[in-house]
Image (cartoon, rainbow, N blue to C red):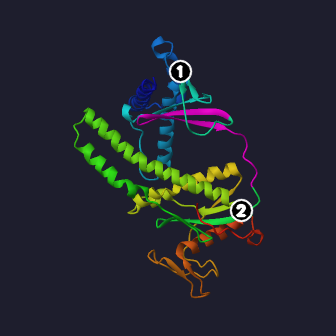
Amino acid sequence: MLERILVDNAETYNACLQERIEAWKLQRKSITYRDQQDELTELRKDERFQWLACDIQRDPLRRVDRAFKAFFRRVKAKSGKAGFPRFRARARYDSFAFSLPVCRERSIKIPNVGDIRARGGRSITGREKLCTIKRDGNRWTASVVCDIGPAPEKVTVSTAVGIDVGLTTLATLSNGVEIENPRWTRKHERRIADAGRVLARKQKRSNNRTRARQALRRAHQCAANARLNYIHHVSKWLISTFDLIVHEKLNIHGMSQGRLAKSIMDAAWGILLYQLKYKAEEAGVWVVPVNPRGTSQRCSNCGEVVKKTLSQRVHSCPNCGLELGRDHNAARNILSLGMSDAGASLQNLALLPSGGLK
């Protein structure tokens, strides 16, 4: 049933996209989400279209509408390639969503399908608002968005830290602690490469090719799961240890366009900063982004600008004699910038813990 829903939604998505394209080409007319929603209501008068819940059938309409809005926004911003919405193959259409799900202890109720057993994951708290069912290879996962009420008040700052993310180490803290960068893609690239070569030798549209494609997907998924699990441990430790976390406000998309793109994406800075943001919101912890400009060149002790190339990994100030790691110096500068934004003062902070990540 879930596979059938995905096939139906993929066809609906492509039909909606085709209708918008032809309406503009032939009549210079823009089709809106409301227009296509009314057409779907008319189609559902036929019993052949009533086997699927209306809310699930509307999900492709919403996706097409969001795709066009994002396209026009990029065109207006003139930020590189706009990326016109494309048709979706059945094999690449992997999820659908519906609102107001009914989640029980060991099952999730899908409209017009019934209760499906579910296991693992966190317990559902708050009011369920939206559920997304996703096909993940041979598994199916459900992501439930819940309204858990207003965020708690921010805590009084007693421990603070600045974070300088990097490639040699995932993050260097202002107290000198270095968090290792495991380089998960590098660890799994042999398995990924072997699976890719096996896939390339298989005949198209054969069962062997399907199995080889699934093996390649599992190789990539293994690296992604290991990376995500590690980032969750790092972010949880930071949130539970510090009341104020200051990090760099980075243009990761722009930085990942160069020769270090693979290493930057493997380090997953964006995932780490995103997890810090939403976990801090729930815990009442301060997370402050600051402009990193000049943080690696300025001395954190006296403020003297000490020019360094990327290959110089040690900060040595000729003015005050301070000598420490380049990233450690940058993390201290990042913390100083974030202190004023959070409204705290250095004099009111307790001694920062010196323990490492466990």
Secondary element at tag 2: helix
Tell me: residue 76, above or below residue 330. Answer: above
Which of marks 1 and 2 precedes in the sequence? Answer: 1
Q: Position of residue 71 (x, y in %)?
A: 47, 43
In this rendering, would 247 be left or right of 84?
Answer: right
Q: Is residue 294 among what the camera can see? A: no
Residue at 52% of width from left, 21% of height from top?
113
Identify the magenta region. 127-154
Q: Position of residue 164 (x, y in %)?
A: 56, 66
Tell me the quarter of the picture where residue 122 sits. top right
| Amino acid type, residue under disc 1 in the picture | Ala
Secondary element at tag 1: loop
| Amino acid type, residue under disc 2 in the picture | Ala
Is residue 7 highlighted in magenta? no
The total number of labels drawn is 2
Residue at 48% of width from left, 47% of height from top?
74
Q: Is residue 124 among what the camera can see? A: yes
In this rendering, would 215 be left or right of 45?
Answer: left
Q: Quadrant of the N terminus?
A: top left
Question: Which residue corresponds to mark 2?
Answer: 342
Q: Nearer the viewer, residue 191 or 325?
A: 191
Q: Position of residue 324 (x, y in %)?
A: 56, 79
Q: Position of residue 209 (x, y in %)?
A: 27, 37
Tell me: residue 131, above or below residue 227. Answer: above
Q: Quadrant of the C terminus?
A: bottom right
Is residue 140 highlighted in magenta? yes
Residue at 42% of width from left, 47% of height from top?
222
Question: Which residue corresponds to mark 1?
Answer: 53
Q: Report how far apart the C-alphas of labels 2 and 1 lie in the structure.
A: 48 Å
Q: Which mark is residue 88?
A: none
Badge 1, how many Cα within 10 Å: few under 14, some, many 20+? some
Q: Nearer the viewer, residue 221 or 311?
A: 221
